Image (tube, rainbow, N blue to C red):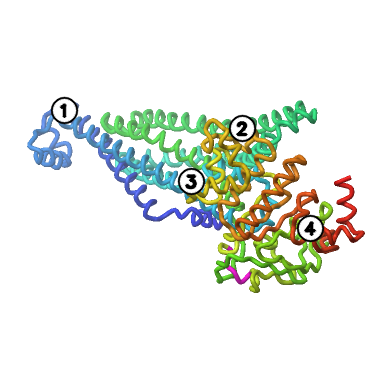
Amino acid sequence: MKKWNYYRGLINLRIKSISILIVMTLVATASEALGLSLFYPIFQYISAEGDIVVLLEQSSIWEYIINFINIFGADVSLGILLLFSFVAFLSRQIFMYIRSVYSARIGKQLEMQLSTKIFKNYLKADIEYYDSMPIGLLANVLTREVATATSAIMRPIELITNLAMLIVFFLILIVISLEMTLVAIIVLIIASYVPKAWIQQSEVVGKKLVSTNNQLTSFLIERLKSPRLVRLSGTKEAEESEFCQLVDKQRRNFVLASVLTARTELVLEPVVILLSLVFLYLSVTMFNMSIELIGLYLLISMRLLPVVKSTMLLWQSVKNSLGSIEVVSNRFQQILNSKEDDTGNITLTSSEIEIDFNSVCYSYPSSHKLAINNVSFLVPANKTTAIVGPSGGGKSTLIDLIPRLRIPDSGTIKINGIRVEEYSTDSLRKIIAYVPQSPQIFNGSIADHIRYGNKDANDEDLHRSASLAGIDSFINTLPEKYNTLIGEDAIRLSGGQRQRLDLARALIQKAHLLILDEPTSNLDADSEDSFKNTLIGIVKETNTTIVIIAHRLPSISHADQIIVLNNGEIEEMGAHTELLSCDGWYSKAWKKQTS
């Protein structure tokens, strides 16, 4: 119950919405009950051959029926009675239609609300959460489990409305025959215990199905991103086999869930039908009920059948969906627990960015070894600072500390003399443009990707950024120019073209700090040299502070300052010519790369 209340609060299911659904169901149920109840006077009217005097003698209720019909200026007749019964049933259908539409709208609103809430908070989570969270699991939650869980949350409302309908119907049956209704209730209670084990088993199967969905989605996302690797590694058959196993596992769990539901449905319907037949026998042989009451009782009993069956199946469906509710709830709670702390309240607006590292240390949560160990250096404003060193030396980790993606264990990082934690996270990151080692290009046009850095950029900004990045000439050779569709990851472009396109995306932000993470790692020598000249031009034209991580030393030989980071510590620091004169890591690496 605690988990259920938490989840209901998570999707903000309003009492007003629940009340409207229940009221509409009750009105619809009352209309149906009225329509069914009218069959009793209809049967009486047919039996009395329309003799009003006889009908008034049989029951005082006819006086009310006659007065009600006279309000509409009509006389009592079989046609009028049937018409009123039809209007009652029609009203029931209209209210049920309105309720269904309203319920669907509320359900989809809740689904959208929950998906958006999870996605928004995911974007606010800290980087340690991203490091540990497989994308496939979150994708499965957002695309599949949220819909199932939201639907399950709506089902108790349907259970409440079904319960209201059952109460109304049983009240009518009690009026008709208390003895038979008590027998019917006892039989239904006994019958409900028959599928109890299947309903409990549905919960277990539902959780297994959620687990299989997670595995399958994760598998697909990982493999669909790397078709070349799979085919060229000779593992195609093994991947096909694993995919088939996962799909078959998903199929078996889904079929088992369907079988359990079908068993419940199989048992309930014969029980209710048998109950109706037993009543027919007893009403004739023991209770001497009139044909009108027998007909009405059977009619209402048959109307009870879909309601009883629907109630049991709804409960089984809720049990089957508990796995989805649990995984969505747990995933959302994990995201909330991993939310970044934004303690700053100063807005960073300066166009000149100077960064000062002072005795900074950082270790990953899962490691006792320092990834960054007592690092101190200054990044001068409007200059280029390069960070180099062997793989695993801590270069990318060091870069993550500047925008507070990671928080130092000790030491201070200051921008323009103020500690970074005193700046608001939004203002701190707005002054930073980032170019990753492997450009992440979404499906769309060239203009769409460049404008991803600034949605409000005009055409002049678009062309200037492309020109600064050295990609403008190439774009103008394309048939659709800036409107050319490049596809996901721009696989039809070369490595250098993708890198320059992503650089244009960063430049259009007009950020004061440009961070590049190994931007030339996938470029040939000519493209690397051209990219270096592009960066030199950017510094001259924009006075941007640039921090660049590199493995290829020729691409950063122009840097104003070069820092050699090894095992999380600074080994050397200086300009290119200074470092060459020393017999350190930089000098040796330069000779190897340029020999």
Q: Nearer the viewer, mark 2 or mark 4?
A: 4
- In the image, residue 65 sits, relative to residue 538, either above or below, namely above
Instruction: Specify the amino acid type for callout 2.
Output: Leu
Name the image quarter holding residue 334: bottom right
Real-space Cα separation, disc 2 to disc 3, in angstroms: 57 Å
User: Circle 3 sits in a helix, a strand or a loop, which is it?
Assistant: helix
Q: Is residue 23 left or right of residue 192?
A: left
| Local crowd size for mark 3, using a 10 Å CA cut-off: few (<14), some (14–19), many (≥20) | few
Real-space Cα separation, disc 4 to disc 3, in angstroms: 39 Å
Residue extent of the magenta highlight: 421-425
Which quadrant is the C terminus positioned in? Answer: top right
Instruction: Specify the amino acid type for callout 1.
Output: Gly
Q: Which residue is mark 4?
A: 394
Q: Nearer the viewer, mark 4 or mark 3?
A: 3
User: Circle 2 sits in a helix, a strand or a loop, which is it?
Assistant: helix
Real-space Cα separation, disc 2 to disc 1, in angstroms: 51 Å
Q: Nearer the viewer, mark 4 or mark 1?
A: 4
| Local crowd size for mark 1, using a 10 Å CA cut-off: few (<14), some (14–19), many (≥20) | few
Q: Is residue 485 left or right of residue 590?
A: left
Q: Which residue is mark 1?
A: 79
Name the image quarter holding residue 46: top left
